[in-house]
Structures are given as structure tokens and as C-alpha cells.
Image: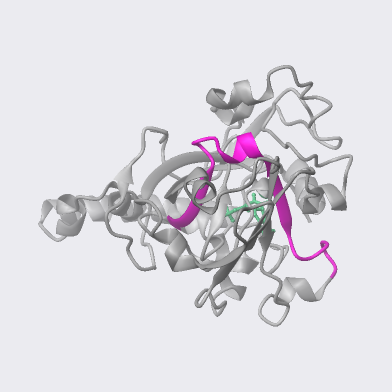
Amino acid sequence: MLIKNADDIRSSEITPKSLYLNRRKFLAGAAIAGTAAATGLGLRQIVSPSVSVLAGNMAGNTAGNKIDGIQKSPFSTTEAITPYKDVTNYNNYYEFSTDKDGPAKLAQNFRTRPWKVKIDGLVEKKQELDVDAIIKMAPPEERIYRHRCVEGWSIVVPWVGFSLSELIKRVNPTSKAKFVEFTTILDPNQMPGQRRQVLDWPYVEGLRMDEAMHPLALLCFGMYGEELPKQDGAPIRIVLPWKYGFKSAKAIVRVRFTDKQPLNTWNIAAPNEYGFYSNVNPNVDHPRWSQAKERRLGEFFKRPTLMFNGYDQVASLYTGMDLKKNF
Ligand SMILES: Nc1nc2c(c(=O)[nH]1)N[C@H]1C(S)=C(S)[C@@H](COP(=O)(O)O)O[C@H]1N2
Ligand SMILES: [Mo]
């Protein structure tokens, strides 16, 4: 659980050894790649027109199908991208496992096609959309975002997707819709973690409509220039870089528009610890640990956590709100 892992972090205060080892391998790999490029063997890296493929190669070997026509985004950070190996082997995905290294193995045979997403609630037309129709709604962009887990670790990921607003605009919520709720697939046959009542399944998350319409809110179907790995939420997830990681629900099968603030899974599990808003906020501690600092995976020293994870452009969404109360 988040609870247990946070305790682990507090007691050890170090990045897991496996990550150090991966990091070292990554650095060694980068040195070799450099040599290969110089001798002409790394041609794909040099001639590739796509930043994302470049990001993928620089971050270590990737594994999936490449996404074509990826555009750059002005929202991307220039900070160092976390190695692919780390991002795909250190996951929170309790439907598969509560161990960080569990989802990478246990999600391997998860079926991500065919995949339908139900659109319902306060919309003009309730419908079921094929995930591949959703993915085609707008051109794919690479968004290199910081991601801050409520547990105190962070990563920098070159996600691929487009603004969630592109989907919302196309499905026409009615004027009564004030919130949107996302539901992860419920399939205990495929997801061993769902055979245990670790959380109240299926995983649900929610946003206020203006948050969901903010251009930073990402509908995500790829990373490192490729299709999203299963352990990272394939075939489709959301990514909300100014909020703690648990708001970014994976493997979404339902998008529901509502006039009432939806419940979210972690709020149900521990209402005094995880709120609805969950904006990254170094000034509001978790009841059991400080949120003032974070450790970037692969780094030794902690760095200060920034308000809204550094995404100040969302601040106006919360004008006049007490963010200590609305944590
Ligand atoms: N369905 C579902 N979505 C989820 C989770 C989960 O357990 N189940 N974990 C959340 C948490 S706590 C984090 S930090 C991010 C991790 O995303 P990543 O594994 O791609 O880095 O996914 C979020 N989305
Ligand atoms: Mo998280």
C-alpha cells in the first residue's frame, strides 16, 4: 500500500539498490551508445526525426511499438529524463501488485485490445468508443513531465498523448457536468491484485471540469516514443503533472460526467490522508510524513518539491481555495 511504502521510504531514505544498479548500467550503456554512434552503428539515433525516439534511446532500450508523427510540446521540461528501465520497473499499479517491481512482470499478458471506453453521465450522447478511435482524435505529442508520487519519489517521463480536453470537447458534456470521473478496468482474472481487497476495486479517480480541461491534463497512450507499456497503464491513462501520481489513473474503461464531486479510491481508503484535489504541495504534509522534498529516481540527494510540482500555470484554478483544507 502507499501507506506501507511510505514507511519504507522513511526508514531507509535511499533509492532502492536495483535502481542504482540500473542507473549504472544505463550510464555504461550510454557510453557504449556514444561509441556506436561515432562509428556509424547508432544511425537510428542520429537520423531519427522524432524527439521521442531519441528520448527512448537515450534513456536505455525500449521495448514496444513506435508511435509515428509525434510532435514536440512547449509544456515539456528540459530536465533529465528518467531511464526507461526505471520508469517501467518501478511502478505503482495495485491491480497487479503492491510491490514496485511486480507490475512489470505480472502485467505482461494483460490484454489491451480490443478495448472500449464507455462515455456516460451528463453527456449529450452516451457512447462506447474504441480506444484506437480515441487515440486518433488528435495528433500525438511528446510531453516530458515531472511526476511526483505522494510517497516522496519522482520521475521525469516523456509521455505521449494529447490534451484530455480534445476528448472532452468531442463527447459534448452538458452544461450540468461539473466533474469527470475515470474508472480503471475491473478484471480480477487478469489482474491478480484485484483478487484481494487491497483497495476498493475498480480504481476510480476524478477531476473538476476546469482541471480536466486544462491543457496540461494529458490523455496518454505512449511513453519514450512508443505505445504505453502495460505496467504504465496501457492502453490509455491520464497524466496530471501538478497532482500526486495516484490521481493519474491507468487502463481507463469509463469516463463519466457528473454534477457531484466523485469519490476517488485513495480518498475512500484513507480520507484523512488522500484528498480529492491532491495537488502537489510542499507546504501541506501528509499526516505521516513531510512533502517538502522528493527523491528523483536514480539520484542520491533529495530536492525540494515545488508548489504544483512546478506547474504554476494551474494556480489560477485554485484561486480563493484553502489548499490546506482542500488537500
Ligand atoms: N488503476 C491504477 N492507476 C494508478 C495506480 C494504481 O495502483 N492503479 N497507481 C497510481 C500511482 S500511486 C502512481 S505514482 C502512478 C504511477 O504511474 P507509473 O507506474 O506509470 O509511473 O500511477 C497511478 N495510477
Ligand atoms: Mo503514487
Where does residue 150 sit, x and y in percent of width and height? 70, 41
Rendering quarter of residue 76 = top left
Q: Is residue 231 visible?
A: yes
Quarter holding the N terminus?
bottom right
Residue at point 70% right, 76% down? 187
Between 261 and 202, the one nearer to me in the picture: 261
Q: Is residue 49 above or below residue 226?
A: above
Q: Is residue 113 above or below residue 52?
A: below
Where does residue 315 sit, x and y in percent of width and height? 61, 22
* Quadrant of the picture in which ligand 1 is shown: bottom right
Residue at point 64% right, 68% down? 102
Residue at point 49% right, 66% down? 131
Q: Is residue 175 left or right of residue 67?
A: right
Residue at point 31% right, 55% down? 57
Q: Is residue 114 above or below residue 314?
A: below
Q: Is residue 15 magenta?
A: no
Where does residue 298 sit, x and y in percent of width and height? 52, 45
Where does residue 28 sit, x and y in percent of width and height? 35, 53
* Residues rendered magenta in the picture: 197-222
Rendering quarter of residue 306 = top right
Please, which residue is most extreme toward the left here?
40
Q: How many marks?
A: 0
Q: Is residue 204 magenta?
A: yes
Please, which residue is most extreme toward the top here?
320
Between 134 and 84, the one nearer to me in the picture: 134
Quarter holding the C terminus?
top right
Please, which residue is most extreme toward the bottom here?
189
Q: Is residue 264 left or right of residue 124?
A: right
Between 178 and 229, the one nearer to me in the picture: 178
Q: Is residue 306 visible?
A: no
